Image (cartoon, rainbow, N blue to C red):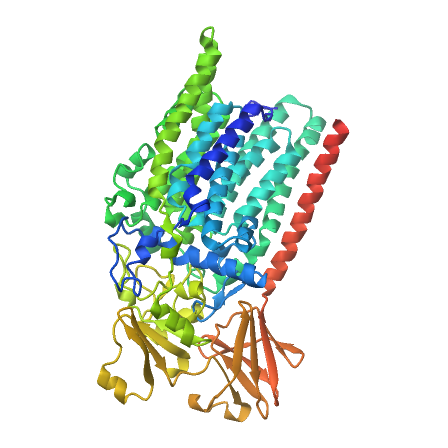
C-alpha cells in the first residue's frame, strides 16, 4: 500500500441505485429512437442532395457540419451493410461490393465487425440498433467513470458527478454522430480503472479489466482514439509502477519487495499482451489496408503539422469548458463557419465539474492521484490547443499524428476533468461532514445538488445538439433510385458529381451521397471511406482525368466525367442532362433510360460487362472482342461466375483487386491477379466452368486466431480468480 493508493472500494446499495438511475436517464434520453421511429442521424442534410431535393427541400433546421454529415454519409451505410449481411446471410461482410468498385470492409477499422455490441445488428434494424448502441455506450461511459472514481476513494455522489460529466460531456455528445469515436472512448476510463485495481491489491481483476479495455478499444474501430486509450493506460501504469517501486524499496526488505512487486508488474505486462491479442482480428486487417492506402502510406511533414495546427483549439474556444454554445452551435445555426466543425472544438465539462476540478487542485492537492490526472488532462488540453505537446504527438508517435486533428485529445481531457471533478467534490464533502453536527446530511445534500446542477446544464444541451431523423426520411426510395436498382444489376453505376463543388463550409452540390449504393444495394464507382487502396485512387483519377477526390476531403471518390468503355460502368446518373437531344439521337453508345425532375439515368451500350473472358491467344485483343460471362453475387464475400470457353482463357471482373480473394476453379484454388489499373483476373481452363470467388483474407484468419487465443486466456484467468475467491471464502 502506498500514499498514492487506497484499498479498492466495495459496491454499495447506493451505488447500484445511482447506476440504475443513470441507466434510466440514458434510455429516456434516447427513447424517441429506441421506442419510436427516429434515427440518430442528421438526415436534414441528405434532403438537399439530388434526387431527394427534386420536389423541394425543407429549410435547414441545423447548420451544415461536415462531421455531423458523416453520420449519414458513412456510418449509417456501413451499419446497414452489416445488418443486411448478418440478418440475411448470417456472415460478417468482410468485403463491401457497393463502393469503389468493391473494397475491403473489414479493413476499414470503423466497420468494427468483431466488436460484440455491433452484433445487435443481426436482430434489429439499422436505425434502432444504432440508437441502442448509443444508449449502451453512454451508460458504459458513465459506469466505467463512476467505478474509477469510486475506486479512487470518492463517494457515490462524487462518482455520479464524474459519470455525468464524461457521459454527457463535450466529447461524447458532439462525436455521437461518428459512433466509432465514442464507442472507443468509453474504454478509456475502463483502462484506467484496470490500472488502479492492479495497484490496489487486485492485480488479477485489474489485469482482466485492463486487457478487456485495451482489446475492445481496438475492436471498436477508431484507432486514433484507441491509441489514446493505450497511451493513457501505459502512462498511468508506468507512473504507478515507478511510485510503487520507490515505496516498496523504502519500506520492505529486498526479498519481500521482489515477492510483492511481481503481481502488479506481471498483471500490467499480461494485460497489454492480452489486449493486443484480443484486438488482433480487427487490428491486422486495418494495418494491412492502411499500408496499401493513400492515407496510411503518408508521412508526417511540416505542412501537415501546420494544417492540423490551424484547426487546433483557439484560446477563446476554451470557454466551451463552461458553456458549450458560448461561440455558437450548429443546432442554433450560429457557429462560425470558418471553424468547420463544432465537434473538433468543444471542450465542455460544465460549471459543476469545473468547480470540482478547482477544488481538487486547491483542497485535494496532497493526493498524488490528483496530480496524475491533472497532468494527463492538462497535457491533452494543451496539445488540443496546439501547444508543444502537439508537436511531440504529431512527429514522435508513429502514424497516430496522421489519423486526425489534435483536438480529439479532448476525449482524454474530458475524462480527466470528470475524475478531478469527482475527487474535488469528495474533498469538500469530507470537510462539510466533519464541520458540525449533522454535517453528513448537509454534505450529502450539497454533493447531490452539484450532481443536479451538472445534469440540468448537460442533458438539455446534449438533447438539443444530437439530431434525430424520422426513419422514413433517411435514404428514402424515389422513382429514380427504383429505376437504378431495376436496371443496374451487376453493372457499375456512376453518379456524376463534380469534386470541385464539394466543400466543408456549405452544403455540397451532389447527385446522391457517395455511399448511397451501400444502402440501396447497387454497385457504384463512387465511395467515401477513411481507407481505400492507392490503386483505386489512381484508377479514379484516370477516369476523372484529374483529381477525383475533393480538395476538402481526400477520403472521397467523386467523378464528373463520362468514362471510357474500359471502365465497365454500365449506367450514369446525373442531375442535369449529359447529352442534348440531338447528341442522344446520333449516339450509338448512350441510351436514356429515365428522365424527370429527379434526374437522368443513361445506359452505356459499349460498357464492358461486369464479368468477361478472353482466350489466351486473344490476350491483346480489343475490348469489344471480350465475351460476357454470367455472374451473380450471393453474398458480400462470394461471387459465382459461369463461362464456357473452348480453350484456356482469362476471366476478368470489374471488382477491386485486393489480397484475400480466393478463386475456386474446377476444384483447384488460385489467387486472382491484378488486371488493368485496379481490377482482378483469374485463369480458367477450357470447357464450361463454374468459378467461385471468396473473400477470406489471411489477416482475418491470423488475427482471429490470436483473438480466440487471448479470449481463452482471459477466461482461464477469470476462472482462476473465481476459484481463488471461493477458496478464501
Residue 290 in picture, x, y percent from top left: 48, 60
Furthest toward the top, the residue is 437
Does the rendering let one see residue 620? yes
- In the picture, which quadrant includes the C terminus? top right
Does the rendering let one see residue 228? no
Q: Is residue 420 left or right of residue 714?
A: left
Residue 720 in picture, x, y percent from top left: 73, 38
Q: Nearer the viewer, residue 452 or 387?
A: 452
Furthest toward the right, the residue is 727
Residue 629 in picture, x, y percent from top left: 52, 84
Q: Is residue 286 above or below residue 204?
A: below
Q: Is residue 166 left or right of residue 682?
A: left
Q: Is residue 369 above or below residue 224?
A: above
Q: Which residue is depicted at the point 77% across and 30% down?
A: 727
Q: Nearer the viewer, residue 196 or 718?
A: 718
- In the picture, which quadrant includes the N terminus? top right
Q: Nearer the viewer, residue 545 or 425?
A: 425
Residue 693 in picture, x, y percent from top left: 58, 74
Disc tally is 0
Amino acid at each position: 500500500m502506498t500514499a498514492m493508493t487506497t484499498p479498492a472500494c466495495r459496491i454499495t446499495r447506493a451505488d447500484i441505485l445511482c447506476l440504475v438511475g443513470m441507466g434510466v436517464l440514458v434510455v429516456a434520453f434516447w427513447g424517441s429512437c429506441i421506442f419510436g421511429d427516429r434515427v440518430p442521424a442528421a438526415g436534414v442534410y441528405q434532403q438537399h442532395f439530388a434526387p431527394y431535393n427534386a420536389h423541394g427541400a425543407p429549410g435547414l433546421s441545423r447548420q451544415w457540419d461536415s462531421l455531423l454529415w458523416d453520420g449519414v454519409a458513412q456510418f449509417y451505410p456501413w451499419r446497414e451493410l452489416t445488418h443486411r449481411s448478418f440478418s440475411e446471410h448470417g456472415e460478417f461482410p468482410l468485403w463491401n461490393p457497393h463502393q469503389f468498385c468493391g473494397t475491403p470492409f473489414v479493413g476499414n477499422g470503423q466497420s468494427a465487425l468483431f466488436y460484440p455490441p455491433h452484433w445487435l445488428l443481426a436482430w434489429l434494424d439499422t436505425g434502432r440498433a444504432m440508437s441502442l448502441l448509443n444508449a449502451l455506450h453512454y451508460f458504459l461511459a458513465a459506469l466505467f467513470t463512476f467505478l474509477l472514481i469510486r475506486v479512487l476513494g470518492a463517494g457515490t455522489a462524487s462518482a455520479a458527478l464524474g459519470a455525468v460529466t464524461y457521459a454527457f460531456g463535450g466529447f461524447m455528445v458532439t462525436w455521437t454522430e461518428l459512433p466509432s469515436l465514442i464507442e472507443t472512448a468509453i474504454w478509456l476510463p475502463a483502462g484506467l480503472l484496470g490500472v488502479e485495481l492492479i495497484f490496489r491489491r487486485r492485480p488479477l481483476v485489474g489485469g482482466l479489466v485492463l486487457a478487456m479495455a485495451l482489446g475492445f478499444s481496438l475492436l471498436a474501430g477508431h484507432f486514433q482514439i484507441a491509441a489514446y486509450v493505450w497511451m493513457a493506460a501505459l502512462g498511468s501504469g508506468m507512473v504507478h509502477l515507478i511510485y510503487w517501486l520507490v515505496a516498496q524499496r523504502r519500506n520492505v526488505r529486498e526479498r519481500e519487495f521482489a515477492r510483492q512487486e511481481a503481481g502488479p508488474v506481471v498483471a500490467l505486462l499480461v494485460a497489454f499482451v492480452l489486449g493486443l491479442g484480443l484486438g488482433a482480428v480487427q487490428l491486422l486487417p486495418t494495418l494491412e489496408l492502411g499500408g496499401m492506402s493513400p492515407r496510411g502510406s503518408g508521412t508526417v511533414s511540416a505542412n501537415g503539422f501546420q494544417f492540423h495546427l490551424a484547426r487546433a483549439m483557439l484560446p477563446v474556444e476554451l470557454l466551451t469548458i463552461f458553456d458549450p454554445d458560448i461561440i455558437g452551435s450548429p443546432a442554433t445555426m450560429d457557429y462560425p463557419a470558418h471553424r468547420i466543425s463544432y465537434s473538433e472544438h468543444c471542450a465542455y465539462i460544465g460549471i459543476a465539474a469545473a468547480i470540482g476540478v478547482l477544488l481538487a487542485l486547491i483542497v485535494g492537492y496532497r493526493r498524488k492521484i490528483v496530480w496524475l490526472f491533472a497532468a494527463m488532462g492538462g497535457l491533452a488540453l494543451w496539445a488540443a490547443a496546439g501547444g508543444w505537446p502537439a508537436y511531440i504527438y504529431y512527429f514522435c508517435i508513429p502514424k497516430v499524428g496522421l489519423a486526425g486533428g489534435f483536438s480529439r485529445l479532448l476525449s482524454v481531457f474530458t475524462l480527466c476533468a470528470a475524475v478531478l471533478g469527482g475527487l474535488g467534490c469528495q474533498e469538500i464533502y469530507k470537510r462539510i461532514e466533519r464541520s458540525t453536527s449533522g454535517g453528513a446530511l448537509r454534505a450529502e445534500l450539497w454533493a447531490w445538488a452539484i450532481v443536479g446542477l451538472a445534469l440540468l446544464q448537460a442533458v438539455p444541451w446534449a438533447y438539443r445538439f444530437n439530431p434525430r431523423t424520422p426513419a422514413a426520411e433517411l435514404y428514402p426510395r424515389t422513382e429514380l433510385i427504383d429505376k437504378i436498382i431495376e436496371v443496374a444489376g451487376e453493372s457499375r453505376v456512376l453518379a456524376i458529381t463534380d469534386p470541385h463543388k464539394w466543400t466543408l463550409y456549405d452544403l455540397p452540390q451532389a447527385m446522391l451521397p457517395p455511399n448511397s449504393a451501400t444502402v440501396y444495394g447497387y454497385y457504384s464507382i463512387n465511395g467515401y471511406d477513411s481507407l481505400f487502396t492507392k490503386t483505386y485512387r489512381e484508377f479514379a483519377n484516370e477516369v476523372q482525368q484529374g483529381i477525383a477526390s475533393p480538395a476538402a476531403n481526400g477520403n472521397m471518390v467523386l467523378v464528373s466525367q463520362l468514362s471510357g468503355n474500359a471502365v465497365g460502368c454500365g449506367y450514369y446518373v446525373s442531375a442535369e442532362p449529359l447529352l442534348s437531344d440531338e447528341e442522344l439521337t446520333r449516339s450509338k453508345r448512350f441510351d436514356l433510360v429515365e428522365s424527370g425532375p429527379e434526374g437522368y439515368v443513361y445506359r452505356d451500350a459499349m460498357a464492358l460487362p461486369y464479368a468477361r473472358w478472353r482466350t489466351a491467344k486473344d490476350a491483346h485483343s480489343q475490348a469489344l472482342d471480350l465475351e460476357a460471362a454470367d455472374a451473380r453475387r450471393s453474398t458480400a464475400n462470394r461471387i459465382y461466375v459461369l463461362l464456357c470457353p473452348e480453350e484456356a482463357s482469362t476471366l476478368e471482373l470489374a471488382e477491386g483487386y485486393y489480397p484475400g480473394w480466393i478463386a475456386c476453379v474446377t476444384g483447384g484454388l488460385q489467387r486472382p491477379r491484378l488486371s488493368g489499373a485496379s481490377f482482378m483476373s483469374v485463369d480458367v481452363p477450357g470447357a464450361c466452368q463454374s468459378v467461385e470467388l471468396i473473400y477470406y483474407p489471411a489477416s482475418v484468419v491470423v488475427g482471429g486466431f490470436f483473438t480466440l487465443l487471448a479470449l481463452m486466456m482471459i477466461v482461464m484467468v477469470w476462472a482462476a480468480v473465481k476459484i481463488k475467491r471461493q477458496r478464501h471464502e
